Image: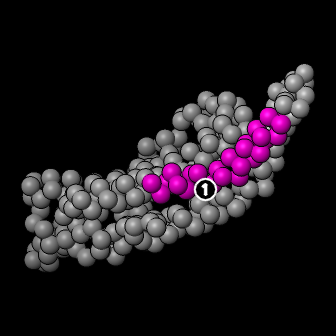
Amino acid sequence: MTGQLANLLNISNDFLWHGIAVFLRVGALVALLPAFGERTVPARIKLVIVLCFVLIVAPAIRLTDRTPSFDTLTLLVMTETLAGFLLGIGIRLFVLALQTAGSIAAQSTSLSQILGGAVSDPLPAMGYILIIAGLALVTITGLHIKAASLIILSYDLLPMGQFPGGSTVSTWGVSRIAQAFGLAFTLAAPFVILSIIYNLTLGAINKAMPQLMVAFVGAPVITAGGLFVLALASPFMLQHWMQALDAYLANPFRMPP
């Protein structure tokens, strides 16, 4: 009986050690995960979310063969936290793309100051709408399932207890940042085109009739036009954004074209 209890205790210690190692990577990822890791989510709720992810991911990962010790724990804290942050930053850049697209669209349509301080991060109205819509869309389409699959896949790409190569991380990071800003400009392209057409038209009218106060006539037009384009283009914008995010979640270390 005593031998069985000792054996059970050893198995429990192994699973607990394994759970701690998984917790480090999952916790860093969830802290940056859209919707689940927002600043408005209470810390206790985040902790419960992390524990739920650990219960899902840990059985799918091979038990670590590293001997429990202070040195091993220190190594795992550094490597697993870094791996989680890398994966989380890659996802968070897609939220940054929506924010940047909203800022570009708002600046192009003279809507940059409305509701500027309504959230923790100062955002124009269009950016706020796109962020809320994007978070809602990514949540209802199964972000938790995709995130769990990403974490399980990450152990093949970033083995437990190993630091990723510096040159690989730098190349990957630069490409991801470039992709985020390219995606932001692509999403905001309809508003930039509208702004160019508006300013060219306003310049032609002002040239033809200098005595007309074109600014007073044109301001309501560009505002209404921006809202109209937002209503028409936002479904296509969010669909394109979701496709890019899903491609990242399926293969996070594939270099974007």
Front in this rendered view, residue 62 or 173? 173
Kindly tell me whether residue 17 is visible in this rendering: no
Q: Residues within 10 Å of mark 1 (few under 14, many from 20)?
A: some
Question: Residue 172 or 63: which is nearer the viewer?
Answer: 172
Q: Which element is circle 1 on?
A: helix
**23 or 160: nearer the viewer:** 160
Above/below status of 26 relative to 196: below
Q: As shown in the figure, which amino acid type bears the numbered disc 1?
A: Thr
* Quadrant into which the N terminus falls: bottom left
Residue at the image point whose x is 81% and y is 48% from the top = 228
Considering the whole magenta stretch, tell me its main secondary structure: helix
Q: In the image, what residue occupies the spot 9% across and 55% down?
A: 71
x and y, in percent, of residue 20 in the image: 25, 59
Report whether 124 appears left or right of 87. Answer: right
Q: Position of residue 190 (x, y in %)?
A: 71, 52
Q: Quadrant of residue 84?
A: bottom left
The x, y position of residue 106, in whole percent, is 67, 39
Judging by the rendered image, the residue that carries numbered circle 1 is 186
208 lies above or below 50: above
The magenta stretch is 178-204
The residue positioned farthest toward the top in the image shown: 211
Q: Residue visible at 43% across and 43% down?
A: 43
Q: Is residue 123 visible?
A: yes
Q: Is 202 covered by the magenta stretch?
A: yes
Which residue corresponds to the image point at 41% horizontal and 49% vertical from the top-left? Answer: 31
Asked where in the image residue 113 lies, by quadrant, the reply is top right
> Is 83 positioned to the left or the right of 129 in the image?
left
